Amino acid sequence: MKVIRRVGVVDSHIDGRLVALNSDLEFVELDVMGEFIWSQTATPTDTDRIVQAVTAQFEVDVATCREDVIRFLHELHSAHLIDLS
């Protein structure tokens, strides 16, 4: 699955947490794992690359990681922060 950040989305650290803001001024606060996955979307990518990066950085098995990454990407999509294709 291809992953592309939407135009107009901005992010910023506020009180030590990363917040991503969509064009409707709705925001999502990201935890450490969410911030890492978000950083992987700085340029167009795909889920396989994100899963590889996460499993290289954190101790998690590939199957669990893939499931969690896909679920999280759908949450970001629902929040109008990324496009998926």
Image: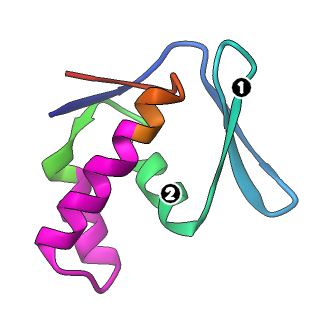
Instruction: Say which residue label 1 marks.
Output: 26
Image quadrant in which you'd find residue 8:
top right
Q: How many labels sit on residues?
A: 2
Write the residue at 32% across / 49% down: 71
- 56 within the magenta span: yes
Of the residues shown, which amino acid type is indicated by label 1? Answer: Glu
Q: Observer-nearest residue: 69 or 8?
A: 69
Residue 63 spot, x, y in % from top left: 12, 70
- The vertical placement of 72 against 81, above or below, is below
Q: Which mark is residue 39?
A: none
Residue 48 screen position, x and y as percent: 13, 50
Quarter of the figure with residue 26: top right
Question: Where does the magenta region start and end?
Answer: 50-74
Q: Amino acid at mark 2?
A: Gly
Q: Residue at x 19, y 45 (%)?
A: 47
Determine whether 30 is above or below 55 in the image.
above
* Residue 35 magenta: no
The secondary structure that dominates the magenta segment is: helix
Q: Nearer the viewer, mark 1 or mark 2?
A: 1
In space, the residues marked 1 and 2 are separated at their CA atoms by 17 Å
Where residue 83 sits: x, y (%)? 35, 21
Quadrant in the picture for the N terminus:
top left
Q: Quadrant of the C terminus?
A: top left
- Quick check: 68 left or right of 41? left
Density class for disc 1 (Cα within 10 Å; few <14, some 14-19, many ≥20) is few
On residue 34, which mark appears?
2
Q: Up-down: is 80 above or below 24? A: below
- First of labels 1, 2 by sequence position: 1
Specify the farthest residue to the bottom.
59
What residue do we see at 42% from left, 29% from top? 77
Left or right: where 83 falls relative to 52: right
